[in-house]
Amino acid sequence: MISVQNHRPLLSGNKWLLILVVALAAACSPKTRPVGKGTTKPTEKTSDKPGNKADKDKKEDKDAKKVSDKRVSTIAMILPFGLDHLNPGANYSAAGLKKAALALDYYRGFKLALDSLTSEGANYRLQLFDSKDETSQSHSLALNPQVKGSDLIVGPVFPDGMKAFTTVPGNTKKLILSPLSPSAPTTYNVQNLITVIPPLEYHALRAAEFAVAKTKTKKIFILTSGYSAELPYIKYFKKAVDSLSKKKVKVIQLTVSRGNLKPAMAQMTKFDRNFMVIPSTNQSFLKITLYSLDTLSKHYPVTLIGHPNWEKFSFLKADQMQRLNAYITSADRVNYKSQATVTFVRNYRRLYRAEPSEYAIKGFDEGLYFGQLLAEEGDKLKSLDDNEFTGLHNSFDFIYKPGQGWVNKHVNLLHYENFELKKTE
């Protein structure tokens, strides 16, 4: 069973978004499941011989009663629908409509997962609340008894709303899932938070693990533009390299101006790979620096490691990145050729008459993972580190950090091969 509630009376009039939400709440979704690890249990087989039919019927009746007697897991979902913009005389801004679309897509994916689990006997009560993407509303919802009494709280989505929600005194008993933000858990410093999108620290750690394991020169270059936005990544990367190599690998940080790489050339070798890390996301800087590095790579072997946001940059040239033997860390890689993804996309299209966005895929993965844990015996939410999971967009491998809660540390490493990014083993 899945029910959806709002924190206020339903709005009147021709409210297309509200109608969609209500319609989706009543929809019945097909069974759709990717590969999971540590969260499923085998089912027992019974004999089909005629003499065992009575026993089989008794077992089915017993199983049916067991399912009906199961507790109902309550999930409070706080998403930025901004339904006030549907009132007469009000309109969505472009930004507001984008947030509402994000909320709707995430909700659809999450509910599709819960419906799949419900078809296997699980029971859920999904309560939907509108955060309006306002800090005051997030603060108010943190005091709502329906929210506080839920088994799992999903949202608010954006950092400001999450900060307002988690700073309410006494709001530290139930687990709170940050569903889409990669913000560092130190932003909130609450012990009951679940950060499911790996923060930048774990991207830097994955890059450092690769570089330390592969470098033979015992030197890693960081090419920076000098902008302060790059400092967090640099700090995390250096710390990881020092820890992993016991300070036997030297990190050389160089500020590059107008593509001038001469200061690096004096410390490079022509006989082994020179590892270059570029933490910048500035388009102008990247175009000039990558061109210079491409020219330099004709004389000095290079392996390049880029910022995770590079995966979204269309201006990067695949042939150039391949010549630079480039790698990028990622926590959002979807294999659209896998059978699990094909099944999900087919069912999503059939149910919603729409294409699933990245938020729908993340909603599905998170709904399936946490829905499974809620449905199983015992309080599995207290031991996320014992329940790994392989989803459509990423895997979940949680670590508990005192004062910060649970953090997913799984990050993929992608490599340019045959002019496209491919996941490395």
Image (cartoon, rainbow, N blue to C red):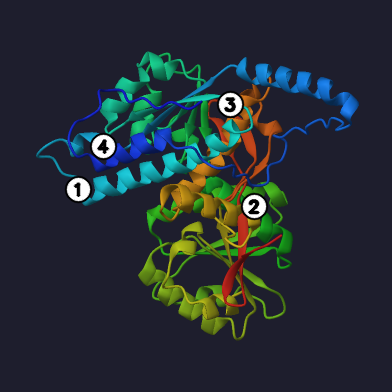
Q: Position of residue 185 (x, y in %)?
A: 49, 35
Local packing at callout 3 (Cα closer than 10 Å; few below 14, some 14-19, many 20+) is few
Three-letter amino acid code at the position of disc 4 = Gly
Instruction: Look at the numbered disc 2 and give the secondary structure of its residue.
Output: helix
How far, Cα to Cα, is label 4 from label 2? 44 Å
Say left or right for 185 vs 416: left
Residue shown at 63%/35% (left/top)? Answer: 399
Do labels 1 and 4 touch, CB within 8 Å? no
* Res 402 label: 3
Residue linked to disc 1: 93
Give the foreground label among 4 and 3: 4
Q: Earlier in the sequence, mark 4 or mark 3?
A: 4
Tell me the quarter of the picture where residue 70 sits. Answer: top right
Instruction: Look at the numbered disc 4 and give the secondary structure of its residue.
Output: loop
Give the foreground label among 2 and 3: 3
Residue shown at 82%/20% (left/top)? Answer: 54
Give the foreground label among 3 and 1: 1
Q: Earlier in the sequence, mark 2 or mark 3?
A: 2
Residue linked to disc 4: 82
Which quarter of the figure is the C terminus placed in? Answer: bottom right
How far, Cα to Cα, is label 1 from label 4? 10 Å
Q: Which of marks 4 and 2 is nearer the N terminus?
A: 4
Instruction: Look at the numbered disc 1 and give the secondary structure of its residue.
Output: loop
Q: Earlier in the sequence, mark 1 or mark 4?
A: 4
Local packing at callout 2 (Cα closer than 10 Å; few below 14, some 14-19, many 20+) is many
Q: Nearer the viewer, residue 280 or 33?
A: 33
Local packing at callout 1 (Cα closer than 10 Å; few below 14, some 14-19, many 20+) is few
Q: Nearer the viewer, residue 9 or 208?
A: 9
Q: Which of marks 3 and 1 is nearer the N terminus?
A: 1
Residue shown at 36%/71% (left/top)? Answer: 284
Residue linked to disc 2: 241
Q: Position of residue 292 (x, y in %)?
A: 48, 80
